[in-house]
Image (tube, rainbow, N blue to C red):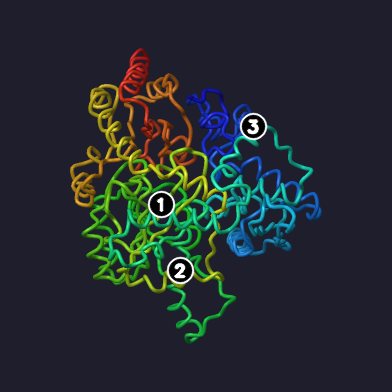
Amino acid sequence: MISEILGESIPKNTEHAVSVCLPLWADVVGYEEGDARVLDSLTTGYPRFFIHASVKRLCNLISEQYARAGESCLCFPSYLVAKRCREYITVKSKQLDKDADIGKIRILQLAMPQDDTDHTGIFDCKIAALFFKSELFPLAKQYWQHSGEIVSSRLADYVTERLYPNAIHIDEATKDNKTFIETRFGRNLDSSFINRAKDILRNRIAHKVVETDHNQDVATNVFLFPSGMASIFTAHRLLLNYDHIRVSNIKHNGVDKSDDIIGYGEPYLKTVMFGFPYTDTLSILKKFNHTYFLGLGDESAMKDLIGILESGEQILAVFLEAPSNPLLKMCDMSKLKQLSQQYGFFIVVDETVSGFVNIDILSYCDIVCSSLTKIFSGDSNVIAGSLVVNPASKLHDFAIDFLNDPKRNEDLLWCEDSVYLERNSRDFIDRAQKINKIAEDLVSTVLLEEEGQLLEKIYYPSLTSPESKLNYDSVKCNNGGYGGLISIVFKREDQAKVFYDNLSLNKGPSLGTNFTLVCPYAILAHYAELDEVAKYGVVKNLVRISVGLESLETLQTIFRKAFDAAKDV
């Protein structure tokens, strides 16, 4: 069922949806410009950008009870995450104004009450509330968005029900949404069931990503997170902590100072962002350290990387997407691996777009990150991420120690979210392969007909460029395809607008859903920097298409109708 009303959830009537309906081009522009007409209509949104109503309610309830005059509150899934946010606010405030008076930033840890007579909520749970001057909220929100270390809407509901039982009304529809948990696991949602769901998830990912001896427990190399961005953020933190050993040798003669702020520029080594990435990945590398941005992600960018390395500068790591979003470019992984071995840097790959199914990438890098919110889940009703460490990497032992150290990393994927994710992902391979076929046929039968007519360019792994296709095919799995993500660039902006407005499909943020989802990507993700991102090919006339499981015939009809409307302009 297609969502058509501005601001309603995608999918429709879904309490924990991770997308929102923006049916018209003007709605997307209005969202970016802060138009009250649009913002007041939003019932939900992508959870890292739009703080879910359940989370807002929890923050407001805690504020009413604990906040001091002039303070705002934002909740995080653990005390350590709240500490990292406090550090970010402090560092960034001082960078903006070295004399800034940020006041006292307080952390309150809240534990859920335990009642032996109540068996409906027996999973141990603690959250942390961060209190700060209200004018600092934009910085706190930046940390929430960039780090992805968020409180999910299901976790917020659980905490609210436990701490403020009179503040939440659970109607029959909401009860129906919760029956899956009781049906699948019975009323007692205890830790053994949760651990089983997470073990299944780790094994499901490991046996698709890691090729190793069957006697080895490959799932020990897989870690789960509350969002895909949290996995990338943690990979970056891990690498900074690795570099901290070198920095401590310089600053403190090898003595580790626990009060040191790790990262945020020199003396920590720079990273490299290779190719044009999803916006928050670059923000992590820029705001939590310093980085080179080689945004073209092609052979010329590889030459630029070689120039940096040959200058004698040591870099910490190269981050990239495989393939990139939204331009579907693929790096020469063999060349990059050869350079990493020669010059001693690490490689972190975000393979969200390929969805574990289409490319075999782990052997070329040290860490693979992915958003499980996308094709792995497909249902657009849960947010999560994963990180896989290459067992053959020289980083492996340090990474595993870091990720298993509760003082440095925690399992923050909320238990109910893991249960829904396990259910959603049981058929992810079959779904991904079907989407591969539908997308490829849609390109060949409809989109290519418009290239040179309405369309200036089609970005798709087999079409982006001969160089990119060669690189992609070199790592493509035997049964893999080119994925379900396509970007099309219109020659004229007015025709792009009419096409989008007349497309009878779900329209909003996110990708990898079981239904086709479309957005004007540059407008939605880079509205404030359109001229800058256009230098890398991400132009305002670009429309990104995430192909779903609708029949090819249905999609052909819908796309041709929208193209016909655009031709009438």
Residue closest to the far top: 568
Label 3 neighbour load within 10 Å: few <14, some 14-19, many 20+: few
Quadrant assignment for the C terminus? top left
Q: In this view, does 419 lie above or below 87?
A: above
Residues 469 and 546: in front is 546
Residue 223, quarter of the rendered image: bottom left
Circle 3 residue: 173
Residue 209 horizontal side relative to residue 380, left or right: left
Q: Where is residue 430 in the image (x, y as percent from the top left)?
A: 33, 40
Q: In this view, does 327 lie above or below 319?
A: above
Let me know if residue 267 appears in the view.
no
Q: Where is residue 489 in the image (x, y as percent from the top left)?
A: 33, 31
Q: Give the mark nearer the N terminus: 1 vs 2.
A: 2
Q: Is residue 35 above or below residue 421?
A: above
Rounded to the nearest whole Å, what is the CA distance between mark 1 and mark 2? 20 Å
Q: What element carries label 1?
A: strand
Which mark is drawn over residue 370? 1
Q: Which residue is drawn at 37% across and 68% down?
A: 316
Rounded to the nearest whole Å, what is the CA distance between mark 3 and mark 2? 46 Å
Circle 2 residue: 240
Q: Give the mark nearer the N terminus: 3 vs 2.
A: 3
Residue 449 horizontal side relative to residue 554, left or right: left
Residue 38, quarter of the rendered image: top right
Q: Give the mark nearer the N terminus: 1 vs 3.
A: 3
Rounded to the nearest whole Å, what is the CA distance between mark 1 and mark 3? 32 Å
Q: Residue at x 56, y 44 (%)?
A: 47
